[in-house]
Amino acid sequence: MTQLILNIESPSVARAIKSLVKNIAGVEVVGLRTQKKKSGFELAMDDVKAGRLTEYSSVEEMIEAAKK
């Protein structure tokens, strides 16, 4: 048996491809899996790993920067 794995951005396109493929003889659609969305913490850790950080010397400096 040969498997074909596709990564598809749009859920509507995935459903359309699934409906087309299931009509082909000898082809079985096993299922659709969606990627789990990252939590806020996971996104923050990605920022840390990528170096997207800003350091402040005081809380007051951070508040002033947030006002801008």
Image: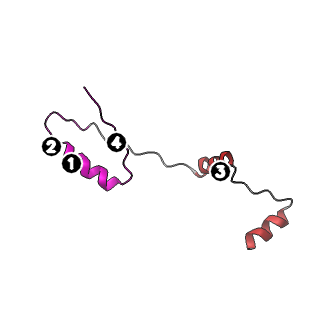
Name the amino acid, label 2. Asn
User: In the visual, does 54 lie left or right of 15?
Assistant: right
Magenta residue span? 1-29
Residue drawn at (36%, 48%) of the image: 8
The front one of 6 and 12 is 6
- Give the residue at x 19% y 47%: 20
* Residue designated by label 4: 6
Real-space CA distance between mark 1 and mark 4, rounded to the nearest whole angstrom: 14 Å
Residue 56, percent from left and from top: 82, 59
| Nearest to N terminus: mark 4 or mark 2 | 4
On-image quarter of the C terminus = bottom right
Mark 4: amino acid: Leu
Mark 3 lies on residue? 47
Residue 2 pos. (x, y %): 27, 28
In the picture, measured across the screen, residue 36 lies left or right of residue 51, that is left
Query: Whole-Å distance between the Cαs marked 1 and 3?
Result: 38 Å
**From mark 1 to mark 2, how far is it between C-alphas?**
7 Å
